[in-house]
């Protein structure tokens, strides 16, 4: 399996830390979080665009869903763990069989602006 991955955030003990605000995440691995931050600011949701915000599981799922919509990503992955739980967006996924044949799964999402 091959796909592009982009770190969106870490959720931990009721908080959400955007990848762009996490110094341990390389900038090239946090592009989607920057796109979402810029969109949130443009829409007037500056409270959600802070590096770290309060977020229970439901809020974390909502933020990930917003990110999928804003970035037109096919989906996101919620990791597991007892400490920080990573949220990762991903792009087209290519599955390769043992015989070398492959197929790519891609969803094209048309994003409409809230002003329309």
Image (cartoon, rainbow, N blue to C red):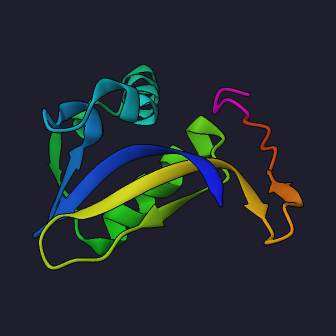
**Which residues are the magenta region?**
112-116
The dominant secondary structure in magenta is loop
The x, y position of residue 30, in whole percent, is 36, 34
Q: Residue at x 13, y 32 (%)?
A: 23
Using the rendered view, name the quadrant where residue 81 is placed.
bottom left
Looking at the rendering, in which quadrant would you find the N terminus? bottom right
Q: Is residue 114 above or below residue 86?
A: above
Examine the structure image and report whether residue 113 is included in the region drawn in magenta.
yes
Q: In this view, does 84 lie above or below 22?
A: below
Q: Which residue is drawn at 38% across and 35% down?
A: 29
Relative placement, left or right, of 62 versus 95 is: left
Looking at the rendering, in which quadrant would you find the C terminus? top right
Q: Residue at x 81, y 69 (%)?
A: 97
Using the rendered view, name the quadrant where residue 78 is placed.
bottom left
Relative placement, left or right, of 34 versus 72 is: left
Q: Nearer the viewer, residue 4 or 22?
A: 4
Asked if one can make out residue 30 in the rendered structure from this viewpoint, the answer is no
Asked if one can make out residue 22 in the rendered structure from this viewpoint, the answer is yes
Examine the structure image and report whether residue 71 is included in the region drawn in magenta.
no
Relative placement, left or right, of 28 versus 111 is: left
Q: Which residue is drawn at 18% across and 33% down?
A: 21
Q: Is residue 110 above or below residue 92?
A: above
The x, y position of residue 76, in whole percent, is 52, 59
The x, y position of residue 56, in whole percent, is 23, 70
Q: Nearer the viewer, residue 100 or 84?
A: 100
């Amino acid at each position: 399996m091959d796909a592009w991955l982009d770190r969106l955030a870490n959720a931990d003990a009721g908080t959400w830390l955007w990848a762009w605000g996490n110094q341990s995440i390389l900038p090239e691995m946090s592009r989607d979080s920057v796109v979402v931050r810029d969109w949130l600011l443009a829409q007037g949701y500056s409270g959600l665009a802070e590096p770290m915000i309060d977020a229970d599981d439901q809020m974390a799922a909502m933020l990930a869903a917003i990110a999928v919509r804003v970035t037109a990503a096919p989906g996101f992955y919620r990791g597991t763990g007892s400490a920080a739980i990573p949220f990762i967006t991903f792009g087209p996924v290519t599955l390769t069989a043992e015989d070398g044949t492959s197929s790519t799964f891609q969803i094209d999402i048309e994003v409409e602006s809230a002003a329309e």
